[in-house]
Amino acid sequence: MSFTYNRLDKDDVALLMVDHQAGLLSLARDFSADEFKNNVLALAEIAKFFDIPTILTTSFEDGPNGPMVPELKEMFPEAPYLAHPGQINAWDNEDFVAAVKATGKKQLLIAGVVTEVCVAFPALSALEEGYEVFVVTDASGTFNQTTRDAAWDRMSQAGAQLTSWFGVGCELHRDWRNDIEGFGGLLAGHLPAYANLMQSYSQQSQG
Amino acid sequence: MSFTYNRLDKDDVALLMVDHQAGLLSLARDFSADEFKNNVLALAEIAKFFDIPTILTTSFEDGPNGPMVPELKEMFPEAPYLAHPGQINAWDNEDFVAAVKATGKKQLLIAGVVTEVCVAFPALSALEEGYEVFVVTDASGTFNQTTRDAAWDRMSQAGAQLTSWFGVGCELHRDWRNDIEGFGGLLAGHLPAYANLMQSYSQQSQG
Amino acid sequence: MSFTYNRLDKDDVALLMVDHQAGLLSLARDFSADEFKNNVLALAEIAKFFDIPTILTTSFEDGPNGPMVPELKEMFPEAPYLAHPGQINAWDNEDFVAAVKATGKKQLLIAGVVTEVCVAFPALSALEEGYEVFVVTDASGTFNQTTRDAAWDRMSQAGAQLTSWFGVGCELHRDWRNDIEGFGGLLAGHLPAYANLMQSYSQQSQG
Amino acid sequence: MSFTYNRLDKDDVALLMVDHQAGLLSLARDFSADEFKNNVLALAEIAKFFDIPTILTTSFEDGPNGPMVPELKEMFPEAPYLAHPGQINAWDNEDFVAAVKATGKKQLLIAGVVTEVCVAFPALSALEEGYEVFVVTDASGTFNQTTRDAAWDRMSQAGAQLTSWFGVGCELHRDWRNDIEGFGGLLAGHLPAYANLMQSYSQQSQG
Amino acid sequence: MSFTYNRLDKDDVALLMVDHQAGLLSLARDFSADEFKNNVLALAEIAKFFDIPTILTTSFEDGPNGPMVPELKEMFPEAPYLAHPGQINAWDNEDFVAAVKATGKKQLLIAGVVTEVCVAFPALSALEEGYEVFVVTDASGTFNQTTRDAAWDRMSQAGAQLTSWFGVGCELHRDWRNDIEGFGGLLAGHLPAYANLMQSYSQQSQG
Amino acid sequence: MSFTYNRLDKDDVALLMVDHQAGLLSLARDFSADEFKNNVLALAEIAKFFDIPTILTTSFEDGPNGPMVPELKEMFPEAPYLAHPGQINAWDNEDFVAAVKATGKKQLLIAGVVTEVCVAFPALSALEEGYEVFVVTDASGTFNQTTRDAAWDRMSQAGAQLTSWFGVGCELHRDWRNDIEGFGGLLAGHLPAYANLMQSYSQQSQG
Amino acid sequence: MSFTYNRLDKDDVALLMVDHQAGLLSLARDFSADEFKNNVLALAEIAKFFDIPTILTTSFEDGPNGPMVPELKEMFPEAPYLAHPGQINAWDNEDFVAAVKATGKKQLLIAGVVTEVCVAFPALSALEEGYEVFVVTDASGTFNQTTRDAAWDRMSQAGAQLTSWFGVGCELHRDWRNDIEGFGGLLAGHLPAYANLMQSYSQQSQG
Amino acid sequence: MSFTYNRLDKDDVALLMVDHQAGLLSLARDFSADEFKNNVLALAEIAKFFDIPTILTTSFEDGPNGPMVPELKEMFPEAPYLAHPGQINAWDNEDFVAAVKATGKKQLLIAGVVTEVCVAFPALSALEEGYEVFVVTDASGTFNQTTRDAAWDRMSQAGAQLTSWFGVGCELHRDWRNDIEGFGGLLAGHLPAYANLMQSYSQQSQG
């Protein structure tokens, strides 16, 4: 059974951030609140770093779901920002699909809250339309580990690839020599354990 | 490898509630008792909300397995209520299969106690007969997480899709505009965290 | 070292519900949302059942902390309902202390969100003033288990007794014969596992 | 601060088995069902082995709580078997206290279901009357680890000592030479890991 | 993708118990010792109940691995009992394969210690030869959950089905009416939670 | 037994940050790296907010232990910064004790890496000299939860009070009206779950 | 669906140790530090024992990632030791691929830090080129169990087989009789639980 | 309440290693086998490093409990090596107590298997005789975390101090300048995470 490794390609990928809203985030309990916020922002920063077309979408921002996490909105001031008026699967919103198609990319990174709905539904829809789908698992949250496991299994069986923000960053960057400082800084900002390594190294170098 | 996303369709789906009996529920220890009861009732309420044909089945109600959870019986007073007289796999009961076929649906939601038997056996039988099977993982319980994981793997490898009551509700509803109040109320009733959001929002709106 | 067992006495105890507000509840992650809501309401129902003077207090209800959980407000329409205008320790609010003293009781049940602040501070203050303090641990929530453990240790070392809503109910009731139906119904309503036993028993009795 | 080590003394100790009833056992979820049953029977066997006066007590055996675990009843055919007619704290039942006093012992081993009620209440009462109380933690079960931790803390602060069935057996036996075969057999019967050691040893000895 | 549900068939299945030896059992730490011993004996009893050809095999019984668990040996006095003299994969032992073939069955239940070796190797070998392989996951143990998960994934991807002793028993029994007493007794003996239900029921019936 | 609640008093407390060095942080595994870094910085920010005298100390900064976490150094440019040249217990360093005494405070907040050494030793020494010691448990890290639990028990038995950065902040602030904006901003910066509440509230207020 | 069991063959396999560097190891938190070090060294010892061509590779050894774990370097003094100058996927380094090809093997064992990058990327590349890939899961580490699970799923779906150092050793050895002493010693050195068995056995033999 | 910090003093302390026997170690499941072996050897090495009088004791070495862990015996060739012939509490063995008294020390470090018996009993006995007792928690093992927690509580309430091998080493060493190389080497040998720091540092220093 032959396998083709279609790597994430920074020139052929778009990022979909689905319903990372202040209210909904309180539903995500498969990560600590600290870790989840950090993961979401790290993914956003990666998209910015590699200049990846990013689409933000929300549902019922004016209601209890609350506003899009403000840091995301600030990081992508010119990104399509789509409130899907009622559809639960963002892919059912024509404007959203149009925005995705307008990017002209065939790989999609998807993250959102909650995993089995806001991530899984558009992921399955996009797979059906032939996109290569990469689920950014640690920037997606849900009620508990049970429903997460079920959602992962469903998406994986359908052909989605499960990854993480760190894996995405590394797969896009390919070679440290493309920008050591920039990429290192990005990692250190979101990986305290790596920042520690850099600080120890840096002091000793100057010592 | 192409993938087709056959969504849950409220006009083409039936729900099978298998052996949610008072005695057997005490065997399910992969959820806290509070959470499990809540999950089971939430799934039932979803079926009612979308008017999905529902079949209740029990085994040995008069013996140690105990009676069907009374809330379920009350919610579906006109649903087929089948005591499978001895068969462990409900699908081996001709009346049960007849009731399933009588619904005329080709998608089946299955939940029950215990997962590796009362859910897995009819799920595998239904898959063999060409049904699309969706296992409602969090409305199904068993002895511990090890046997649950094994059962999930077996069903998933055979082609069943793993989902949760929340995922089911959202996949069926498709669009909030179909009934915001009703669906929101249903969620709030079973997701205290979401109810909290609604209460905060509601007070501020009136403030 | 002699020990005196001062039991909870329904004629000498008051209940303090501190800051169970819709917003703050989203901070409590040492319980699942389902379990926590159930625990809080069970405690409230116990107070109502035994006619225990209950004091509700909130902080900044009009701000992000959100409104008191509405079920609580409805259950105690005539209870003192005190918004402590800024004090973090409710005991620093003179009106609150006055309300506590007005009950004339010397035992206090305390529950709240978050444990190390809204429960621990008034608990320590009350201990200093000579009250017997019982912390209802499972109707009190906080960020994670680490901070909970630290808070429990601090209160326990100061002389508070740690208990749970079920323990409180049983210690107050003393004898089932005081009201079998009523107390059994209360337990069954909040302990699905116990409800299951009652249903099995009841069916067989009628069988 | 001086400390006196009052060891468990087989000639000065009684065992109280409180409410180990078939129904109530389904409420104990801080152990797996296998482990808990094993722990309870091991404790009973220890009492029998050392000929320790044992008192069995139940609450509402004819109702949903169900009958005393039959193995216990069979092991102690002549032990006082007391149904406390309504009192939740067994110590409130005069017959029970009379039975305890009739043993003439001043050390009490207590185990039961659920820990924060059926164990904690009589433990606190017995401490107040000057008994040395040893809680057999792993033959006592409750809803979850949170309420268990709270109950342990309350009893420990009041002066109870926390122990386990294995610790109890060893503290009573004192010296293997008193009965190597008997005590080893008892352990092997309830500690599969120890049975394994014995089997390996025994085969090699014969080899 | 069509699916055929080849159920476990008591007339077409054999059981392989691989290296359940007293020494090796101490390596299995993904279950508590109590639970694991219980699971292994439950599986054996099922095989006996349904008269399923069973093959016991051990490795280096005279060395540190220790003797076969004696209860197993006693339960199957006439079963092929094969010491594979050095082969790590039991399937590399011609006598073992001959014994399997001699049963004439095409379904194999496999359990053993440790999962990724003593279970996985013969499972993969048997799959290659066209057997239907069912791994009895909870009667198989290993060092920790990480290596277990890896082993499960490898076997599942190769086509093995993951099951549990309870699932096996129910899939073989098919219909309670075949022998209610016998099968119920078997379950109660290894499922304390089910035994509790039976005892409650039984008392009430007699009451 | 009477109890006096000596609250944390912002005018009578000093903070000791012990050995939060880039290398040593990699040893702290009882928190995720994200959470621990967040907790440490939150505590530091609290000290700054309330203008609490703070003492930073390190051991062997030029060796493998690595430099003090740079953010801490930047936040307290004028704080005593003491490298204890070899003493493992910072309190054995005369300069350190002198710096503590120079603050003139009698309450000490202590945090550090690793808990059972760098926190516990100076905590026990300070208790002996009559200071009131508050251990900031979640800004202190160690190898695993077992050694943490042991260290907490030892310090608690000696009279230290266990608290958390959030508890410290609230106990010092006493009344929100002292500075709503400032304190709220501090919390939101380190509690994403609280920031979510504020963002939802804020949008709706403006809506 | 037919399955071929291509066993690990000591004459047709090479081992790739990717980025086991002193700094990066501090990022691996899905194992305790003790266990992970033990697993990595055990895998290396197996390669040495079976004389398997081994390739060591590192990234930025002179920077914060730190040097290759010295024990590995010492164990394979003549192995290709390749610093990939910037490529994140070692397979993008032509020298690395050349070294792999030079071994002439078609099975590859891969372990590294972190799993979703340093292991997953070369694993996927090697699969694409037709190698049989075996991921040594417990000698590979990453940030937490969530990202590990995602990485395992991605590799498994692509056709990699998940295994462990113990499974690798046993699959390569095939038959204890090839070298009982040597292989037993290797296991005992890294499996304290097995060493215990051997010591008990050995003493009794001499007794 | 005044507190005196009696530090561990290398000139006034003895170490008791109780029943670390090959067979019994298989009963200790509150640590992984790797970690536990490492902890036990680390403690022994500390005793050797500081030349602390050490007493080894075993029970029934010739039976299933198996021989003392050989590494311990080799490290202390001249230590009193006492087989307590039948007494379960080592302190009941006159020779053992005599050996303890012969050391002339008043502080005792105690570690053993299993915690609630082999550690707790001599610890309580030693406390009664006025010794200062330090329990080395992570070099002591038992069946599970429940019985460990109960045993810790009992010993702590009686006045024992809970510590860990790392805490013991640091409390004894007091000042790194006493022997940087030696103590650093000891730590690195048992703390892979610390060894990593040293290797990174060392390479960079030479770079």
Image (cartoon, coloured by chain):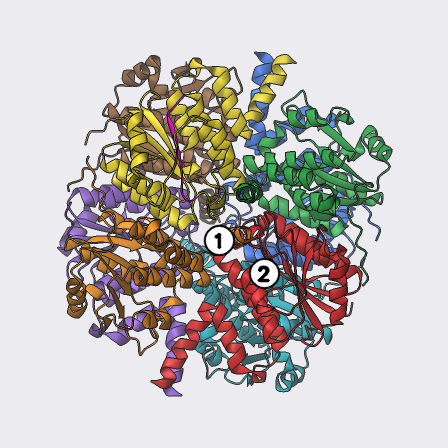
Chain colours: A yellow, B orange, C red, D cyan, E purple, F green, G brown, H blue
Q: Position of residue F118 (x, y in %)?
A: 70, 36
Q: Which residue is mark 1?
A: B198
Q: Amino acid at mark 1?
A: Met
Number of marks in picture: 2
From the viewer's perspective, is A47 left or right of C22?
A: left
- Residue C139's tag is 2
Residues G76 and F162: in front is F162
* Residue H160 x, y percent position in the rendering: 71, 53
Q: Residue at x 21, y 42 (%)?
A: E125
Q: Residue furthest left?
A: E104
Magenta residues, start to end: A51-60
Instruction: Give the answer, above or below, for where F138 lies relative to H198.
Output: below
- Secondary structure beneath dot 2 equals helix
Vertical arrangement, residue E161 with respect to residue D77, above or below: above
Residues C82 and E141: in front is C82
Q: Is residue D60 left or right of residue B102?
A: right
